[in-house]
Image (spheres, grey):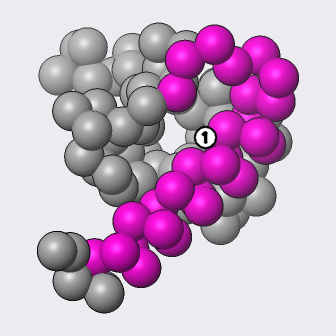
Amino acid sequence: MKNTYILEYERAANNLKAAFVAKYFGRDVSDVFWIGGVIGEVLAVNDYFFDLQDIVDFIKYNYTKKSMFEYYDYNLKLRSEDKYPINIKNYRQLK
């Protein structure tokens, strides 16, 4: 049986998932799942991948759908070049 704190964490992670998917993908969602079934780690949405901290930050810093995808592409490009991107919190102010 799962610990009460773990159940609360998973419920919160799933609530964040639902809010994130609704805000940034709307009805254009064909596939949403936690990778490996591990709630609160990496979320797959239509072939995009987000860890829970990114989900929290996009919501917390009120990114628009356009700016979220812009950051996602920027992050992916830099990481493919073995470089480190600016974090979500500071990206819009420093770009």
Residue at the location (48% across, 68% down)? 11
- Report the front residue among 21 and 56: 21
Quadrant the N terminus occupies: bottom left
* Residue 88 appears in the rendering: no
- Provide the residue designation for mark 1: 95
Q: Position of residue 13 (x, y in %)?
A: 47, 62
**In the figure, 61 relative to 22: above or below?**
below
Residue 80 x/y as whole percent: 26, 14
Determine whether, in the image, residue 33 is placed left or right of residue 36: right
**Where does the image place residue 87, in percent across and percent down from the top left?**
43, 52
User: Which segment did they paint magenta?
Assistant: 6-32
**Of 23 and 14, the residue lying toward us:** 14
Crowd band around label 1 with a 10 angstrom C-alpha radius: few (<14), some (14–19), many (20+): few
Report the front residue among 64 and 52.
Answer: 52
SS majority, magenta:
helix
Give the residue drawn at x 20%, y 75%: 2
Residue drawn at 70 percent across, 53 percent down? 19
The reply to whether residue 9 is visible in this rendering is yes
- Where residue 50 sits: x, y (%)? 43, 37
